Amino acid sequence: MLPSTPQPPPPPDHHHHHHPKKSKELRTTLHSVKSHISAHHCAWLSATVLLQLLIILFLSRASPPPPPPSVHHHHFESADEDRTCKNGRIYVYDLPPMLNKDLLENCHDIDPWSSRCTAVSNGGFGPPATGLAAVVPGNLTPAWYWTDMYAAEVIYHDRMNSYKCRTLDRNQATAFYIPFYAGLAVGKFLWFNYTSKHRDFHAAEMLNWVSDQDPWKKSNGSDHFIMLGRLTWDFRRLTDDNGEWGTKFIYMPLMKNVLRLAVEKSQWDDLEISIPYPTSFHPRSEPDIRQWQTLIRTRKRSSLFTFVGATRKKIRNDFRGVLMNYCKSESAACRLVDCSVARCYDGAPAILEAFLDSDFCLQPKGDGFTRRSAFDCMLAGSIPVFFWRGSFEYQYEWHLPRDALSYSVFIDHGNVRNDTSIIRDALEKYSRADIERMREKIVDFLPRLLYSRSNTDLGSVEDAFDIAMDGVLRRFKQQKIDTKLKG
């Protein structure tokens, strides 16, 4: 269950603001005076009344005025919080454990190939990175982890639990976050002889549960959102054919109003927002970010471009194979990291060093149009070269500049197949000033691509999570305004 909300201390009682010592002295004085009053001495009665008035007047002048009511102080705090969370607050559902916590506890059993326990450790960051001494300053190495490309579900949930604009009061929420690990849940069932029912089981259970909650009933899910750690295509199965890939989660009727965050979105779905793939650098402070920005800005680079990847022999006319062969033939200009030979796990040293030493990095399609490697490339201050428009158009609109050509290069893959030499020709047309200007653009927006740990103070910097949550709240706030205007 979610932790209970700490209760503020009771406000001070301003109706009985006593000074015990002075009151006691007053009572003693009055008692002494009255004990000497005779029924036959009326003059003494007048003197006593006068003495009482003088004592009361003296105490009222000596006592400090009572402090202003505590409600004013609380109002000031609320106003300050409202400025911080001006677009609203997010309520986090406490889902049945089978939909998130149990998946982490059974991490050895959620992937048919190997254990996922290290990948989901450390709040989704994975194990601390090693072997980076040659490429990362020693004081920054504690901020590096071998982070899995599909760990965003865990990272977002961990960050949300301590998010500054989280609320424990459903009635105060602008948005409702569903911390269901949809990608982890389906991962085990994507291969081998599992049925469509296996792949849909956890998603169906989640929707049955959340649709019974009062906030959902009020909005039919239109102010709810979820984080999908895998590509959107893994959640878009069209039929119940057991041989078809993925789950039909997104196409389930109850999902028709739910906003989805994903590392790659469908360009034709207005309810999807793409967010950056996690990289290996998770800054602990603003100085961490500034130091890394300076490093990639001033780094001396020996190669014009680089390609990191492996061929896919089962794919006919694999474009990665085309790029790899070309890079081998242009060894004077291209630095190659062949992942069929080198170990290319989540941001490995060989990958980082290749990107740090190259002005440009070649970025073909991944499993979808986008690729984690493009973010590793920009993390190192290298300029991505895309070959499909779907790799940058309509993707990461909250996090990347609208003008993709200000920080990247586009060369159509069809033209490259006809003549690979156009790659070097195109890149050599960029002057040193052009390259520095594009790199500076990347350096400038780089913090928006990073994920820091929970409760980290980044000073004036907003990271990828902050940008995403602000975007969600802005969208839902505007949605409510539009609904009211429509009547």
Image (tube, grey):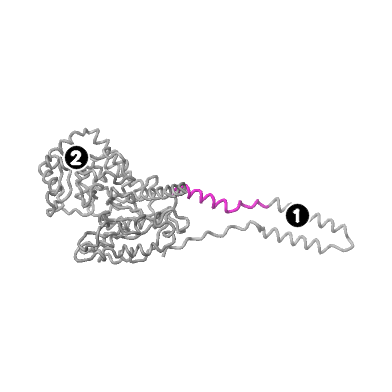
Q: What residue lies at 12% left-to-right and 40% top-to-bottom? A: 420
Looking at this rendering, what residue extends furthest in the left direction? 329
**Direction from residue 455 to residue 234 in the image, left or right:** left
Q: Can residue 422 be seen in this view?
A: yes
Residues under labels 2 and 1: Cα distance?
Answer: 93 Å
Q: Residue furthest right?
A: 40
Residues shaded magenta: 63-87
Position of residue 341 measured from the top left corner of the image (x, y, whole percent) = 13, 53
The kind of secondary structure element at disc 1 is helix
Q: Report whether 269 appears left or right of 90.
A: left
Q: Main secondary structure of the magenta part?
A: helix
Q: How many residues crowd around disc 2 within 10 Å: few (fewer than 14), some, or many (20 or more)? A: some
Q: Where is residue 12 in the image (x, y as percent from the top left)?
A: 60, 57
Which label's residue is closer to the chain start, 2 or 1? Answer: 1
| Magenta-drawn stretch contains 72 | yes
Amino acid type of the residue that numbered disc 1 sits on in the rendered structure: Ile
Along the line of sight, which residue is nearer the eye, 364 or 310? 364
- Residue 41, relative to residue 475: is it above or below? below
Residue 24 occupies quadrant = bottom right
- Residue located beneath label 1 in the image: 55
Q: Which of marks 2 and 1 is in front?
A: 2
Mark 1: give few (<14), some (14-19) or many (20+) Cα within 10 Å: some
The circle drawn on residue 411 is 2
Q: Where is residue 335 in the image (x, y as percent from the top left)?
A: 15, 44
Q: In this view, does 414 lie to the left or right of 47?
A: left
Q: How many labels does the image show?
A: 2
Q: Kindly identify the amino acid type of the residue bearing the numbered disc 2.
A: Ile
Residue under the point 54% across and 59% down: 9
